[in-house]
Image (cartoon, helix red, strand yellow):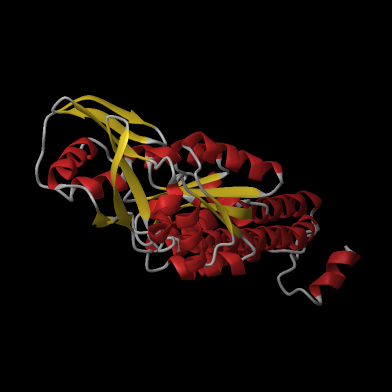
Amino acid sequence: SPFLDGAARFLPWATSLRDPLSLSIFAFITTIVIACPCALGLATPMALITGTGAASKKGLIIRNAEAIQTARDVTVAVLDKTGTITEGKPTVVETNLSPEALAAVASLEAFSNHPLAKAIAAASDERLPVTDLEEITGEGVRGKVAGTTWFVGRPEDASKYDAHLALGRTVVEVRRDELASGFVAVEDPLREDAIEGIRRLSEMGISCVMATGDNEKTALAVAARVGIAEVRAGVRPDGKLDLVRNLQARGGKVLMTGDGMNDAAALKGADIGVAIGSGTDLAIDSADIVIVKGGISRLADAVAISRKTFTVIRQNLFWAFAYNVIAIPLAMGALLHPVIAEGAMAFSSISVILNSMRVK
């Protein structure tokens, strides 16, 4: 036809066939080859696989694909204090308890998995028989040692310990038969990357909120050191979940990070729950992402990888569609040779794969 003859002057691969049946078969085969959706099928999974691989090299285990998709839209990061902003390895720095009282308290705390309890338990090597043990969530531990009832936990009047609280220490009060008999001051050092991680999150436009069951003065002292402006102190486990829901009600996505049993409900309720790998099994089971190496700076890595991954996915989809938008009309008009179509189809898949590798 005149159309094909004219096209052959500019397209050297244009067919010389002019028989209607042969021309139709030629156009059909070329169209089927170029329309193969290989690149389209690779566009999203290749980027996601590369993204999760890059995350694992950073010490992040992403447990579901939804997490890497949601992380790019995070606007608020709720951070637990103990074990998240701090190392979660507190030590006793001061106490006014007698050796006998400290032994009784350490015997009680030996039954708890809370980081503060472990620190107090380590302060005495002596262990005494304990009965009627009761762990009161968000308050402390009560039990009987040698017929005496001991309580170890939240102070009734925290203002008595202001000197310790101003230094960022946590004070645990000891009550013997319901009467205050002393205290234990515990200090937990900051994680090495806490300040850098919070700075990076802020630069990404993510607001950081510290949520802790600790005293307000202790929380404010730690928050000031790491650069967090919004602090919610004295928060009980169910209060952390309420906080997450209130922040979600403002709009945007909320990321929650913690490492303890008290954080499990909030981790599950947040848009993304992130557990510190050294935390409790319950926290890890409740999380979408687990940090197995590093601290808060890994949160910034997770968000950066998510944003990069979805930028690459959009690019992949654009090029996958672009090849077809240009090539399919040419193939239908018998202006494309099947060999050229096969090469273009293969090249589109290769370009998607190579572009996905940029996530690394």
Residue at the (31%, 54%) spot, across then down = 185
Which residue is nearer to you in this view: 110 or 349? 110
Extreme residue toward the top, this view: 132
- Of residues 66 and 78, the one drawn nearer to the viewer in this rendering: 78
Image quarter hosting the N terminus: bottom right
- At 47% across and 44% down in the image, what residue appears? 288
Front residue (pair 25, 128):
128
On the image, the x and y values in percent for residue 178 come to 32, 31
The answer to whether residue 341 is above or below residue 78 is below
- Whether residue 153 sits left or right of residue 106 in the image: it is right
Going 71% across and 46% down the picture, which residue do you hit?
251
- In this view of the protein, can residue 336 be seen by the observer? yes
Residue drawn at x 47%, y 71% is 196
Q: Is residue 9 left or right of residue 146?
A: right
Residue 326 left/right relative to 115: right
Percent x, y of residue 154: 39, 41
The picture quadrant where one finds residue 150 is top left
Instruction: Specify whether residue 354 is in view.
Output: no
x and y, in percent, of residue 59 in the image: 37, 59
Residue 242: x %, y % from top left: 58, 37
Q: How many marks?
A: 0
Q: Residue furthest right?
A: 2
Residue 164 appears in which quarter of the rendering?
Answer: bottom left
Q: Is residue 285 left or right of residue 150?
A: right
